[in-house]
Amino acid sequence: MTCFLVPSSVCHEIDSLMSDFVWHKKGVRKIHWLAWDKVCASNEVGGLGLRKMSEFNLAMLAKQLWRVVINPDNLIVHILKQRYFQHCELQEARAVAGCSFTWSSILVSRELIAVGIWWQIGSGWQVKIWQDCWIPRPISFQLITTPNSLSLQATVVELIDGSGNWIVGLIHRIFWQEDVDAILAIPFNMGDQDVLRWHFEKHSHYSVHSGYKVLRLGLIYRAAASSLETWIREIHRSLDRANFGRALLICWFLWWTRNKLIFESVEVSAEEVIGRVWRMEASFLLFQKNARELEKTRQAHHGILLSALDG
């Protein structure tokens, strides 16, 4: 399972055998009181934490792809590049007719790796500003600013001056404020190499455990819709109160944008969505501030009234 994509029918059969082992006694068939998907949920949400074979298989294949990504000078990687993606990047490689089954299997896991991979900035020479994931903003890790004056092939080193500091004026001129704040907060050392990292592990290297967890959380679009509740719970656990509220507000406006397009054929730009999010958040915070001040005034008046009555 670490090198080959197991057919879904085989994975389903293995899942069935595991389910029978959990629910049946020897020689006696019993009712399966919970769907296997719920049994395989993590202990945190009431499951047993067992593995679904199809997702576990994909998580193991992603481990092989991760090795290809972070070891570009490895001999086997050079052979694969010459054979399968000599004239393109790995993310653009295709499983062409006649390619090995191992290679086509490994490529299936690209979507999983893409969810959590990002560049840790060193010199900035290797990282493309508009195309690569380098902004410390899960889960996209990309800029929200639309490409403008800098070319699509521009690298991060063009945002750094000769003394190894960010060119603040240029960054303010090119990027939206949210991106400006994120970029200027990135620490870097011009003497270091740019390094690929995996977001979902503390040691920043992909593991089968973290890859499987990403699949179970539904952070990839094709994952089951039933994982939405788990996804919300994980987001709530990983964000503070203010950012969690902001995340829900963004989700609501994305849903509103989707409905405008489908039912009214009205396209809403990303800039407008972001603007609406910030305006609504500002209005809410202003309302909260006014409400607190009103409550303080009410309590003060109440105290004065009680003093007058006692007197």
Image (cartoon, grey):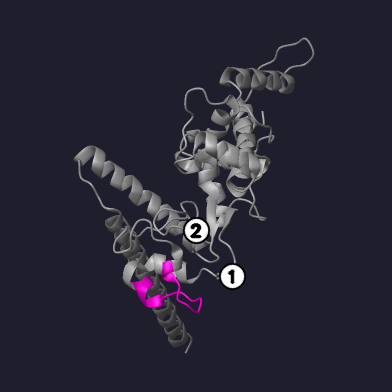
Judge by depth and name the residue closer to the eye, 145 or 77: 77
Residue placed under numbered mark 2 in the picture: 126
Q: Residue 17, position in %: x, y?
A: 69, 18
Front residue (pair 102, 255): 102
Question: In the displayed image of the protein, which residue is found farthest to the right?
Answer: 26
Q: Residue at x 54, y 49 (%)?
A: 116
Could you say which quadrant of the image residue 212 lies in? top right
Judge by depth and name the residue closer to the eye, 4 or 216.
4
Q: Image height check: is 301 above or below 40?
A: below
Q: CA distance from mark 1 to mark 2?
A: 13 Å
Q: Within the image, what quadrant is residue 245 found in?
A: bottom left
Magenta span contains residue 170? yes
Instruction: Give me the residue at 65% from left, 38% from top.
Output: 46
- Amino acid, disc 2: Gln
| Amino acid type indicated by mark 1 | Gly
Q: Is residue 270 magenta?
A: no
Q: Earlier in the sequence, mark 1 or mark 2?
A: 2
Q: Is residue 227 left or right of residue 171?
A: right
**Residue 165 in view in this figure:** yes
User: Residue 154 at x, y = what percent?
Assistant: 39, 60
Residue 261: x percent and y percent?
A: 24, 42
* Residue 44 seen in the current view: no
Circle 2 sits in a helix, a strand or a loop, which is it? loop
**Pointer 1 local density, CA inside 10 Å: few below 14, some 14–19, many at least 20:** few
Judging by the rendered image, the residue that carries numbered circle 1 is: 191
